[in-house]
Image (cartoon, rainbow, N blue to C red):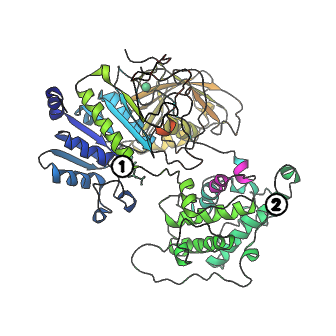
Amino acid sequence: MTSTSQREAIKGAKVLMVGAGGIGCELLKTLALSGFQDIHIIDMDTIEVSNLNRQFLFRQSHVGQSKAKVAREAVLKFRPSINITASHANVKDPQFNVEFFKQFNVVLNGLDNLDARRHVNRLCLAAEVPLVESGTTGFLGQVTVHIKGRTECYECQTKPTPKTYPVCTITSTPSKFVHCIVWAKDLLFAKLFGDKNQGNDLNVRSSSNGSEGNNSSDASKDVFEQSPHESPDQYARKIYDHVFGHNIEAALSNEETWKNRRRPRPIYVRDVLPEGERNEGVKYEDGVGSIPSAMGLLGLKNPQEIWSLSENTRVFLEVVRLFLEKRDKEVGNLTFDKDDQLAVEFVTASANIRASSFGIPLHSLFEAKGIAGNIVHAVATTNAIISGLIVIEAIKVLLRDSNNYRMTYCLEHPNRKMLLMPVEPFEANPSCYVCSETPLLLEVNTATTKLRDVIDKIVKSKLGMNLPLVMQGLSLIYEEGDDLDADMVATYAINLDKVLNEFPTPVTNGTTLSVEDFQQELTCNINIKHRDEFDEEKEPDGMVLTGWSGPTTKSEKSSSSSNGDSSSAAGAKRKLEEVSEGNGKNKGIAQEVEVNDEDDDVSVLDGFPETNKKKRVQ
Ligand SMILES: Nc1ncnc2c1ncn2[C@@H]1O[C@H](COP(=O)(O)OP(=O)(O)OP(=O)(O)O)[C@@H](O)[C@H]1O
Ligand SMILES: [Zn+2]
């Protein structure tokens, strides 16, 4: 039941919704049915068949159409008089600038990635518009409220980094199926079908004749190149024998490695397929429609069945052939996509063959896809609950009912048999580089690191800036944007390749760089500290960015699988639930919700005793 004041607030509100997927469909319906009259939706995607089971505003006939537009039309059918504007666009597009955001009373996020969430957070801060943020992962979910000057912003807490594995485990000593998947997806798939200019650790144990171990300089005999007279099938067999046969034999020659480990078994095509069996390609009709799947052509119908080693081998050979024959234009540009059936078949087969070599249990395509794509199957009910909670918070925000703002976690509390846990919002983190002006510290080897590395790995990747501008004192050393003239573009290109201490005024120990993103209206200062050496395993970027930390001091590094779009309530809190290994499409932040029973780091309402260490909003 809504009160008169609530009804008035709802009626007069102009709302921006970002994302019209699983949460977005539910949210738009609930907003419309709650009396909201003026809603703008932004979503960059088109509808896919796999969305239909839960994104109930969409039907089979809508596949391929804009989610934002179809969602609008579907809701207008039962609420024809309300005003819904739909933008089929990326929220990061320049038209959605601070001025655009300022027209709204509240912004509601139903996104699925960290990058877009951070961008919206920054625009909301700059435009001073309240943000209600959300996410779901299977049965878990959360809704949080972010209001400039009142609560923490979405980025006040550091986000756990995605689970990574030591390179040598992946290239040489896998012990779990997930290691084989990472190898198949990030190394072998990338090597065969991805950008050839990208560095690739597959060569750590590769050599063209397989016997002399490390020899990546032998480029003239690059085994991964298809030679002119080699048929796709011959090429596929050569690659198979190289990576599953020769390379394993080369690895076995290093006795030290296997002293305390089970020795892998080299596998060659001739060991698996009957002598003389050629893979000349299963015949299929070339028609309209998509490229056939290898498993379909080979009669392997059930994706939940585990293929034998020979079936995996046949799939491997067939997939390589199909890529070379039917998708040759894409080869060289592909990155793994969980929705690309052929890519999933390749990764499944390759991971299984490697697993077989290392004595690791094989998995079905369905399982392999889940691990490779970090998929946690979405639960429509969680999306519906979360959307209801978003609307409840949005109404409080419109009424400025700040004493009652809640961040609500949808979870299974281990001890207290509760499904929804409301928590009072936290105060902003005074060292947050996004909502405060605290400088950051970058430890870097200024004698070897190029500006390009700082821009790519730190400014874009870590700080989430789209179009950065970098100042060193009063001089502009780097800038991106459409409006730059050719001279500037050329100068910045040269600067990118300069090592930091080679700039006319060297960027070195004690230098402060100021980085700015105009669209996000975000500026932050980075103090440079020179350091000679970095731990390759623990500090793979060769740089360490600090100076922005969660308000609690106890730290416990997250180890749950994630695709990097998550957030944690606080580093010090104990993990409530970890997504099973490699099987977590992290749609939001729920997977990282953590509760510390002993310390009650989060303030639990509804009668639970609390001694809160983090500062709550007063
Ligand atoms: N930068 C962005 N700009 C606009 N919309 C975005 C942006 N990033 C993500 N989205 C949208 O957010 C929505 C998130 O919805 P959801 O989590 O249900 O993902 P999905 O792609 O629909 O489903 P699934 O990934 O499970 O197949 C998607 O519709 C996606 O297009
Ligand atoms: Zn902040």
State whether residue 196 appears in this view. Answer: no
Ligand 1 within 8 A of label 1's CB?
A: yes
The answer to which image quadrant residue 558 occupies is top right
Q: Which residue is mark 2?
A: 250
Residue 10: which disc? Answer: none
> Is 230 one of the magenta-colored residues?
no
Q: Secondary structure at mark 2?
A: helix
Q: Against 228, is 148 above or below? A: above
In the rendering, at what x and y percent does residue 587 appear? 45, 45
Pick whichever of labels 2 and 1 is earlier in the sequence: 1
Number of numbered markers: 2
Quadrant housing the C terminus: top left
Q: Against 303, is 163 above or below? A: above
In the rendered structure, are the residues bearing label 2 and label 1 in contact, judged by CB atoms less than 8 Å apart? no
Query: Horizontal placement of 203 versus 257: left or right?
Result: left
State whether residue 613 appears in this view. Answer: yes
Query: Horizontal placement of 193 versus 288: left or right?
Result: right
- Circle 1: is it few (<14), some (14-19), or many (20+) Cα within 10 Å? many
The residue sitting at 66% across, 68% down in the picture is: 225
Quadrant housing the N terminus: top left
Q: Secondary structure at mark 1?
A: helix
Q: Against 309, is 551 above or below? A: above
Q: Which residue is mark 1?
A: 22
Looking at the rendering, the stretch of residues picked out in magenta corresponds to 168-183
The residue sitting at 35% across, 28% down in the picture is: 125
Q: How far apart are the two marked residues, 2 and 1, measured between alpha carbons?
A: 48 Å
Q: Against 486, is 510 above or below? A: above
Prevailing secondary structure of the magenta residues: helix
Out of 487 and 179, give the one closest to the viewer. Answer: 179
What amino acid is found at the position of numbered circle 2 in the picture? Ala
- Circle 2: is it few (<14), some (14-19), or many (20+) Cα within 10 Å? some
